[in-house]
Amino acid sequence: MIIDSHSHLDDKRFDEDRDQVIEKIQQANIDLVINIGANLSSSKASVELAKQYDFIYAAVGVHPHDASSYSEKVEKEIISLATHKKVVAIGEVGLDFHYDFSPRDIQLQVFIKQIKLANQLGMPLIIHDREAHQPVLEALRKYKDEKTIGVFHSYSGSSEMISDVLDLGFYLSFNGISTFKNAKKVHNAILHTPLDKLLIETDSPYLTPAPFRGKRNDSSNVIYVAKAIAKIKGITIEQVYEKTTENTLTLFGM
């Protein structure tokens, strides 16, 4: 199987041809796609896509960019969405100290609330961590319970930080950046990530892999991520597919 563990097919960039893009993904033999919520409306859209297409699953949550929109009402609606049988995670949640679209103290408060929500619901977390490595790790260490696990999507930390991620019981996911020649930090992180803790993703429509860089990304391009990882780790692409499928299904209880 081939799984794109992180996509945003509800993104407005797909509004004009979403059905055709989804058909393209199926024709490329991508077996499963997990569509990730970024705010309440995005989470609702993710669930609707999962209802409409058998091979799409959903995650629901509020991205740090939208942390200022979080409220008790939003949380109740996220909880309600999370009860759907095809919702597999709370995400994407975390901290983004690069753009700071929401104040950092608000980002942290909302991140902690959603960690506790994952604990309460018994669901894994999909972590967004941009230029906030230590605060993210500290929040997870302090607030997640022993059973709560998850994935650092679009992993951007150092190879040294990987041990901290693994100590939390979390996985690491890599995307089209792995295909960039100058992305030495990411290549090194892939090299140091155990194969049984590795996932592949596109983060589409963003981070398009090298062959199509500058164009809109979609889940069919996850094969280029797999090829890059196979080359970096010196294994076959079949091994990458086998292990990342196993890891994704295990993490998300699918």
Image (spheres, rainbow, N blue to C red):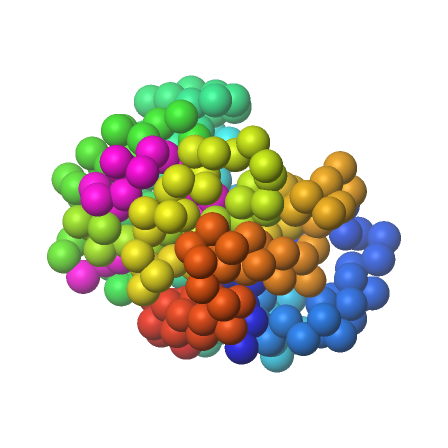
- Please report the residue visible at 78 percent of the width from the left and 42 percent of the height from the top: 215
**Residue 111 pos. (x, y %):** 34, 38
Dominant SS of magenta comes to loop
**Residue 123 pos. (x, y %):** 32, 62
> Is 162 situated left or right of 50 in this image?
left
- Eyeballing the image, is 146 above or below 128? below
Nearer the observer, 192 or 95: 192
> Is 125 situated left or right of 153 in this image?
left
- Please report the residue visible at 34 percent of the width from the left and 72 percent of the height from the top: 250
Does residue 187 appear in this view?
A: yes
- Please report the residue visible at 67 percent of the width from the left and 75 percent of the height from the top: 29
Quadrant hosting residue 164: top left
How many numbered discs, if any?
0
Whether 79 is among the magenta residues is: no
Q: Which residues are magenta?
A: 147-165
> Is 54 situated left or right of 123 in this image?
right
Whether 150 is among the magenta residues is: yes
Does residue 35 appear in this view?
A: no
**Residue 201 pos. (x, y %):** 53, 55
**Residue 121 pos. (x, y %):** 29, 62
Q: Quadrant of the C terminus?
A: bottom left
Nearer the observer, 195 or 231: 231
Residue farthest right in this picture? 16
- Please report the residue visible at 69 percent of the width from the left and 62 percent of the height from the top: 220
Quadrant hosting residue 225: bottom right
- Eyeballing the image, is 44 above or below 254? above
